[in-house]
Amino acid sequence: MLVIDDLSKQYATGDTALRGVSFTLQPGQLLGLIGPSGAGKSTLIRCVNRLVEPTGGSIRLRDVTLSSLSGADLRKARRRIGMIFQEYALVERLTVMENVLSGRLGYVGFWASWFRRFPEADIERAFALLDRVGLMDHVDKRADALSGGQRQRVGIARALAQDPELLLIDEPTASLDPKTSRQVMRLITELCAERGLAGIVNIHDVELAQMFLPRIIGLRAGEIVYDGPASGLNAEVLTRIYGEEDWKKSSQSEEETDSAPAGVASLSLDPAAVR
Amino acid sequence: MAVTIGNDGVKHWTLLTPGQQRWRWFGWLALAAITVFCWRIMTADTIWAFVWDAPRQAADIFERMLPPRWSYINQLWKAIWDTINIATLGTLIALVLATPLAFLAARNTTPSVLFVRPIALFIIVASRSINALIWGLLLVAVLGPGVLAGIIAIALRSIGFIGKLLYEAIEEIDETQVEAIRATGANRSQIISYGIWPQILPAFATISVFRWDINIRESTVLGLVGAGGLGLALEGSLNTLAWPQVSLILLIILVTVVISEWITAKVRKVII
């Protein structure tokens, strides 16, 4: 469905962010992208919706070559690619509803969006999404009045309001606490499964990636050094991605500390239970 | 910062190296010398007899100003109304013109950093570099005396002020919000209206009322050059040495400014 071929990106400063990255994403597949800071994860997913211009290679979504589009065609292609951001990237001074409806901007004209006169179907869809992510009580609140986890859910609802076929998810849990992180990841994977969406998830937390994402690509210095199932992430592979470190010991102790809050989470604040 | 190693091998730290210290001392010396020099030039042409006489003169004028001629206010209502109109309409015109200008001048929204931005910046600087009073002088010569010249003078001066503060606000926005809106497939104008406009709205409102507040003050003196409003009455009274009228006008200007200050504070509170 998404075919990335020999993608490379060199910034004007001379830094090479990506070199010869190629992989194929199947429909409905969730892909985790891991790697050290500066490995090019963010650049890679921003090349897909052209927030960053690639300098070489090609990106194809179904039969559309994303890497050669411009103007109205590019905007049309972007409508079908939802994006979820690390720091939520909500428009802070707009309400939750306006933020979700901003996912429909590609489908309505300027004046309709300026006067907030979105089609009835869009508003219904927004209500349904807010209900699904458990924010029905916060529709008219301003985005900056919400907590981190709630904001990220608005971000998810906005991306889904676009009616996308592909989701680009950039460090969705980096600003969240461990419990909320799990809830948000669970919500994302559930929603993708419900809608048969394919997605690329940039993620720092290897444990979380293994827990929720079936396929993992490891990026190091702009090159793919691992592409395989999450179960294949052993100490040797992690060293190849991140460099030398005592992986066994750290992952064991993390599992011990992680298991406790997970139990508490299911007791109190499951996203499904909230609504 | 300077680290030196003394004879005993211990590290010493001072903020400045000895060389920098010498330069700093020299700088202060130069400043003192310039001050003395300027004082000499300033006093060379002063007629000291007048200066010694100043307190008595001031007391004399003040005495003649009291009490203000209260009945004169009935001739001033029109002038007050004109002054407020000059300030308000001038500010509105400036807002309409300065907003697009600010988007053209801001580094992150300008269509072209090389061509459009310098032109927009030049307009802003040109407008700011000329005082409203001088704009008024020019416009009265072009348009003839009256309120219209005042309104345009205020507008021309305000464009630069509003444009500058607004484009700085645009350059300080959070780009990730803009990126998020761009990623939805929004077009250019939608990116501005959803990604940028909500972020600069508080700055826009504060700048507008702030400038309106300044313009009330400026429009009270614009009449001095014939551009209508209270200044016109002030000039007339000054020329005929009608001090009780002058004091009344000054009092009215004070009250107007206090009221506009109060409105500005209220509006700001509502927005932020």
Image: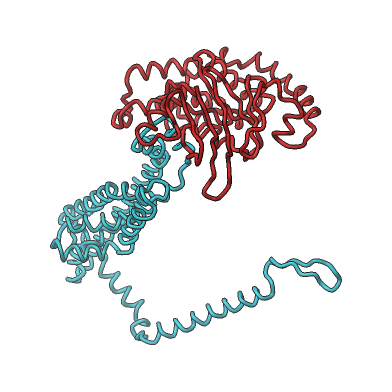
The picture places residue A138, in percent across and down from the top left corner, at: 47, 22
Does residue B245 appear anywhere in the picture?
A: no
Q: Would you say residue A160 is visible in this rendering? A: yes
Using the image as rendered, state which of residue A260 and residue A172 is in the foreground.
A172
Looking at the image, what colour scheme do you see?
by chain
Q: Would residue B148 be found to the left or right of residue B99 on screen? A: left
Does residue A2 appear to the left or right of B246 in the view shown?
Answer: right
Of all residues shown, which one is farthest toward the left? Answer: B144
Could you tell me which residue is drawn at 61 percent across and 29 percent down?
Answer: A33
Give how far across and how far down residue B268 sits, in percent.
Answer: 39, 43
Q: Colour of chain A?
A: red
Q: Quadrant of residue B28?
A: bottom right
Q: Quadrant of the N terminus of chain B?
A: bottom right
In this rendering, is residue B106 above or below B230?
above
Residue at the image position 71 percent from the left and 25 percent from the top = A233
For residue B15, above or below residue A68: below
**Quarter in which the C terminus of chain B is drawn:** top left
Q: Position of residue A53 (x, y in %)?
A: 47, 40
**Nearest the camera: A87 or A209?**
A209
Q: Total of numbered circles in the picture?
A: 0
Relative height, residue B48 to residue A275 (above, below):
below
Identified at 42% across, 29% down, the residue is A78
Q: Residue B215: where, in percent of width, then height?
A: 29, 55
Q: Would residue B23 be found to the left or right of residue A120 on screen? A: right
Using the rendered view, name the quadrant where residue B217 is placed.
bottom left
Q: Determine whether B271 is above or below B112 in the image.
A: above
B212 with respect to A49 (left or right): left
Tell me the shade of chain B: cyan
